[in-house]
Amino acid sequence: MIPFLFTPIGKYLALAAIALVLGTGLYWKIRSDAIAEEQARRQQIELERMRDAIRAGDAVNVDPERLRDKDRFSRD
């Protein structure tokens, strides 16, 4: 196998194999980084939505005396 690498064809095949391995590794690294970045962005959006929902829930008037007050949805 090693004497084959010293031939002109073997040299080019070895260079092509190295280029293929490096290209594949680079592709996998970029892809995994992109997936991690997308997941982090989705988590940030969900945290913002949850924070907004908590703020909206805190702004609701839940006073017990207002339980029987008329509202615009009553059917009377």
Image: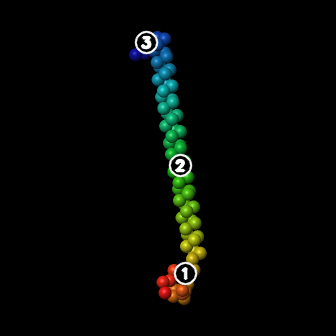
Residue at x 53%, y 49% (from the top left corner): 38
Question: What percent of the width, then of the height, locates residue 33?
Answer: 53, 43
Name the residue type under label 1: Arg
Q: Nearer the viewer, residue 59 or 30?
A: 59
Question: What percent of the width, then of the height, locates residue 39?
Answer: 51, 51
Question: Which residue in the rendered view is the most extreme toward the front?
Answer: 76
Q: Disc number at residue 3? A: 3
Name the residue type under label 3: Pro
Crowding near the residue tagged with mark 2, few <14, some 14–19, many ≥20 C-alpha atoms within 10 Å: few
Q: Secondary structure at mark 2?
A: helix
Question: Which residue in the rendered view is the most extreme toward the top?
Answer: 7
Instruction: Pick whichever of labels 1 and 3 is earlier in the sequence.
Output: 3
Q: Disc number at residue 26? A: none
Residue 56 picture quarter: bottom right
Residue at x 53%, y 39% (from the top left corner): 30
Q: Disc number at residue 38? A: 2
Above/below status of 48 relative to 29: below
Residue beneath disc 1: 72
Q: Measure the C-alpha gap from mark 1 to mark 3.
A: 89 Å
Crowding near the residue tagged with mark 3, few <14, some 14–19, many ≥20 C-alpha atoms within 10 Å: few
